[in-house]
Amino acid sequence: MSVKRSVAKKKVAVKKVVKKSVQSPKRDSSTKSKKITKAAAKKTITIGPKKTAPKPVIKKTTKVVVKPVKEKKLIANTEGKEHIEKAASVKRIRKSSKKPIITLPPPPVIEISNLVKGKVKNILVSQPKPAENEKNPYFDLSKKHNIGLTFRQFIKVEGLTSQEFRAQRIDILEHGAVILTSKLAVDHYFRICNEMRITVPESMKYFCINEQTAYYLQKYIQYRKRKIFFGHGTILDLVDVIRKNKAEKFLLPCSDVNKEQIADFLDEVKIVFTKATFYKTVSADLSDIKFLSDYDILVFFTPVGIKSLKQNFPNFKQGPTRIAAFGYATALQVKNLGYRLDIFAPNPLNPSMTGALDAYIKEANKK
């Protein structure tokens, strides 16, 4: 019996050893698999944020791009008078960049004579006659006061010949930009280029005083394929555009009686430019006008028009005839040539010549 029990005990022991040996690798394999899965899970977790990492970086860059916000924060956080003064200087520079400060001499004082007695019945305007269908303030003035109007141009414009232009020793192709103040400037600029056999490059930049002058360029160039800029009637409208193209050398086509104010402005802004005469203004032949005394008011718009009056009628005595002048230069020329100035525009009450004439006629034609 003892032998049987010992054998049975041995069998049970062997079975336990076998079970342990069988179970142990299973446990090892499970633990290894668990470790592998955990490592894999860790790897997947670490890979995820790397892919999504650029998103917060993009948000940060967008915040950094907004420069004014940063500058405001810096100015608000700074302490001391020095920092406040620096911040104020930055603001002043920004404001001054929008509108330049031009220190030009004040206009001269214009003395106007007292109202001359006598009703106004006929007016001579030293301008070409406008079309009858065209709306013109002078036609409205004539109907309002029942007065006669005569239009006669006292001056004429003549273009310089190619030889006269060469005498100025100006190379057009040295300039990368042109400032055009009128349609006349456009016509004579391209005429001189054609006579001198100069092909204007497509890269030429055009800065026009107003929109009408800009669209007039279509007569000579393809409008869409060129760099064309225009203002609203004054050179001040082109300040920002001219400053952006400050590296260019500008050409200013003008007449022999040019507007010095534009040249003074370009000097003030420190723009490199060349003032070139392309056409000249001369007196017209006024032999068809027999008696100036037939007109109660003579209206002039340029100093050259006053010179033409003196050349064509050297023996003219003003007497009751009234003279109206538009602009300071024209008014000063009236005084310099010994005439009496009766009407002046623009003035604080009437910015236009028709407005000044209207106010004068009301007073003169009172019953």
Image (cartoon, grey):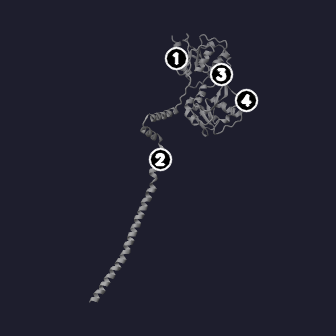
Tell which tag, 1 or 2, sits nearer the viewer. 2
How many neighbours does mark 1 have within 10 angstroms: few (below 14), some (14-19), or many (20 or more)? few
352 and 137: which one is in front? 352
Q: Earlier in the sequence, mark 1 or mark 2?
A: 2
Label 1 to label 2, Cα distance in Å?
Answer: 64 Å
The image position of residue 163, as x and y in percent, is 73, 29
**Distance of label 2 from label 3 (alpha carbons):** 64 Å
Mark 4 or mark 2, earlier in chain: 2
The residue depicted at 30 percent of the width and 85 percent of the height is 8
The residue that disc 2 covers is: 61
Q: Nearer the viewer, mark 3 or mark 4?
A: 4
Residue at image position (52%, 13%) is: 363
User: Distance of mark 4 from mark 2, alpha carbons?
Assistant: 61 Å
Q: Mark 1 vs mark 3: which is more N-terminal?
A: 3
Q: Answer with the quarter of the image where residue 296 lies.
A: top right
Q: Amino acid at mark 4?
A: Gln
298 vs 141, nearest the viewer: 298
Query: In the figure, 181 relative to 121: above or below?
Result: below
The residue beneath circle 1 is 359
In this picture, residue 313 sits left or right of residue 99: right
Give the CA separation, mark 1 to mark 3. Answer: 27 Å
Q: CA distance from mark 4 to mark 1?
A: 49 Å
Identify the amino acid type marked 1: Ala
- The crowding category of the residue bearing disc 2, from other C-alpha atoms within 10 Å (few below 14, some 14 to 19, many at least 20), is few
Residue linked to disc 3: 155
Real-space Cα separation, disc 3 to disc 4, in angstroms: 23 Å
Residue 163: mark: 4
